[in-house]
Image (cartoon, rainbow, N blue to C red):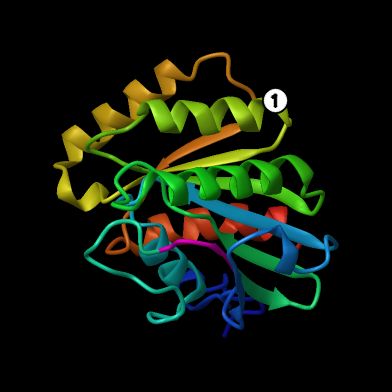
Amino acid sequence: MSGQAKPPNTSQAKNPLQHTRFMLLSPDMDHVPLDSGREVAFAGRSNAGKSSAINALVGHKGLARTSKTPGRTQALVFFEVDEQRRLIDLPGYGYAKVSANLKAQWHHTLDTFLNQRQALRGMILLMDSRHPLTEFDWQMLHWCQSKALPLLILLSKADKLTRREAHATLNKVNQELTGVKDVIVQLFSTAQPASIEQAREVIANWLAL
């Protein structure tokens, strides 16, 4: 027998986001929750896999709606982690097949939200690992920099690349972001538990869980 404690089994570690539930959907700033507590927002192109990432991180397959049709998230979607903490799925950008008027409305709502929201503690930016750092991604990067908001870039769908290709992409993105402050870049796939846990740890830290 040994008197030493066994090291924790990280594969069985409690998920701090496991009790997250749908809170509300708001097409504009008139119906958003009170600006208090801590929030982490998810942004990305309409086909980058935001909803799938949220589902994987909280551990509930059907929490955030997923669709094969890009642009399904057409509003600010709030998920409650607890009474003082929230996750937000922002409208996808880039490929959404909607009218110019609706796109303009989304842009105004998103711009207002990002500029006014005091509860935001960090941004998760999903980029398809096969097509990272698009013009839209750079716009979000520059906004986060202007607001001194910490940013976690998830290079999603990394399982679609070979290991060599994935790490080459990771290195290339890191090189492109040389000198950019408060940015973490990681490979991410809903089929790779280690990448989910890595991202979840950052989010838990931002939410002070």
Q: Which amino acid does label 1 sit on?
A: Ser
Which quadrant of the figure contains the N terminus? bottom right
Does residue 175 sit above or below 88 in this rendering? above
**Residue 119 in view here:** yes
* Of 46 and 150, the residue lying toward us: 46
User: In the image, residue 64 lies at what x, y percent?
Assistant: 44, 73
The residue depicted at 48 percent of the width and 54 percent of the height is 91
The residue depicted at 69 percent of the width and 49 percent of the height is 113
Q: Is the magenta stretch mostly helix, strand or loop?
A: loop
Which residue range is magenta in the image? 73-77
Does 109 lie within the magenta span? no
User: In the image, residue 76 lies at what x, y percent?
Assistant: 58, 62
Q: In this view, does 148 lie to the left or right of 157?
A: right
**Residue at numbered disc 1:** 146
User: In the image, residue 98 lies at what x, y percent?
Assistant: 34, 53
**Residue 32 in view here:** no
